[in-house]
Amino acid sequence: MGTHSNRDNLQIGEIELVKEEFLTGRVLCSSKENASLSIIIQSASGQSRYIDQFDLVAGEQELLLNLSSLTTGNYHAWIEVNGQTFIRTIEVSKSHVNTKKGVFAIIKGIFQL
């Protein structure tokens, strides 16, 4: 009889950043059973910037995280499922952050030419 670790029953992918209307994190998960997943994303200084919980269903699924509150920088995501902890790193660059300028910033830029 072989034994399998709980990690064999659960896979958590890397967090992929996608810029849509707002910064979104996409995580692919695979679980052989239903489970509760909690995620905390912290800045490099340890400040919590995002906290959420999801109910995983058996099989593969994609989780979408609204990360619009993150600014440029490095973050660590602490993902906990059934007592197992997964750590993922996230690097938010300027290209990920909403860089739309307001009217005042546009006018100010015109006069700085």
Image (cartoon, grey):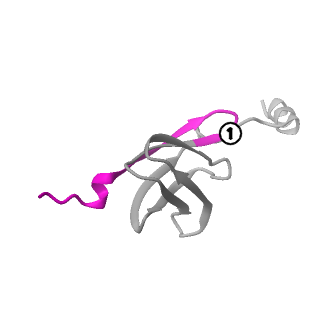
Farthest-out residue, left:
1
Nearest to the observer: residue 21 or residue 53: 53
Residue 17 in magenta stretch: yes
| Residue sitting at x 50%, y 40% | 62
Identify the magenta region: 1-24
User: Residue 16: percent from the left, percent from the top?
Assistant: 48, 41
Farthest-out residue, front:
1
Residue 48 in magenta stretch: no
Nearest to the observer: residue 111 or residue 99: 99
Quadrant of image for the N terminus: bottom left
User: Residue 28: percent from the left, percent from the top?
Assistant: 45, 42
| Residue sitting at x 70%, y 34% | 21
User: Residue 87: percent from the left, percent from the top?
Assistant: 41, 60
Determine the secondary structure under disc 1: loop
Crowdedness near tag 1: few (<14), some (14–19) or many (≥20) residues, C-alpha within 10 Å: some
- Side of 2 where 84 appears, left or right: right
- Side of 102 where 21 appears, left or right: left
User: Residue 68: percent from the left, percent from the top?
Assistant: 67, 47
Q: Which residue is mark 1?
A: 22
| Residue sitting at x 54%, y 63% | 42
Three-letter code for the amino acid on which mark 1 is drawn: Phe
Nearest to the observer: residue 3 or residue 39: 3
For the image, the number of numbered tags is 1
- Side of 25 where 32 appears, left or right: left
